[in-house]
Image: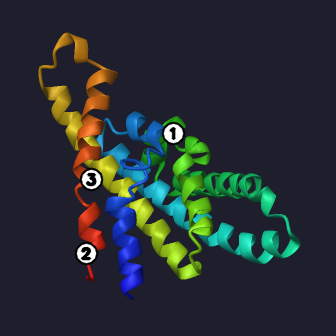
Amino acid sequence: MKTLIIILMSSVLVNNYVLSRFLGICPFLGVSKKLDQATGMGISVTAVMLLATAFTWPIQYFVLDKLGLGYLQTIIFILVIAALVQMLELFLKKVSPSLHKGLGVYLPLITTNCAVLGVAINNITDGYNFIEAMVSSLGCGLGFLLAMVLFSGMRSRIDESKVPAPFKGIAITLIAASFISLAFMGFSGIVDNLFA
């Protein structure tokens, strides 16, 4: 149980895929202007990460490894993630058309979101069993959601502020992202000493 809590906490805070590993930056910068879109994207990415792990982990261990086809891992994982995103898109279109419309072009971009592929591959390379891999994926998804929501709040405050001309646009956005990333680096000692 301790191990699962450590995996979850470190995935959310310390090894945050956006803020410390710099994966998934495109949706982080592109969809974080409005809180509802940022939340929707974070939840969608979390769902895809969980589904991707639920499908890719057994494929890796029961198909690719058994048949000696481990070199096909990236291609197979991309195909699985693409299929899952298409299913999620159809589901959101039927259940929540406003969220589907709000996410717009960014929803299909989850297919190419390197954070989703990174989670699936890192769960294998880290040697996690299925339960640990699912907890890691949940933590990574929640970390992505947390980063999106925090950054959305920060961007709304920036939009209301007077920003010097040289820093307007993407410059101030990247500076704000770096501040959030620095803040998350402060969590590194907490998880290490959680059960010490």
Quadrant for residue 74, please give it.
bottom right
Dot 2 corresponds to which residue? 193
Earlier in the chain: of badge 2 and badge 1, it is 1
Q: Which mark is residue 184?
A: 3
Q: What's the colour scheme?
A: rainbow
Inter-mark Cα distance, 2 to 1: 38 Å
Q: Which mark is residue 93?
A: none
Question: In this figure, what is the number of numbered marks?
Answer: 3
Residue at 34% across / 39% down in the picture?
Answer: 32
Q: Nearer the viewer, residue 58 or 70?
A: 70
Q: Look at the picture and state if 62 lies above or below 153.
A: below
Q: Look at the picture and state if 46 lies above or below 167.
A: below
Which amino acid type is marked by label 1? Tyr
Return the x and y of residue 61 as percentages of the image width and height. 73, 75
The reply to whether discs 3 and 2 touch (Cβ–Cβ < 8 Å) is no
Residue at 54% across / 36% down in the picture?
Answer: 105
Residue at 38% across / 56% down in the picture?
Answer: 16
> Within 10 Å of the Cα at label 2, are there few (<14), some (14-19), or many (20+) other Cα atoms?
few
Return the x and y of residue 120 as percentages of the image width and height. 60, 62
Does dot 1 land on a helix, a strand or a loop?
Answer: helix
Dot 1 corresponds to which residue? 106
Q: Nearer the viewer, residue 178 or 79?
A: 178
Return the x and y of residue 88 as percentages of the image width and height. 58, 56
Residue at 28% across / 61% down in the picture?
Answer: 188
Residue 130 left/right relative to 163: right
Inter-mark Cα distance, 3 to 2: 16 Å
Which amino acid type is marked by label 3? Phe
> Within 10 Å of the Cα at label 3, are there few (<14), some (14-19), or many (20+) other Cα atoms?
some
Earlier in the chain: of badge 3 and badge 1, it is 1
The reply to whether discs 3 and 1 touch (Cβ–Cβ < 8 Å) is no
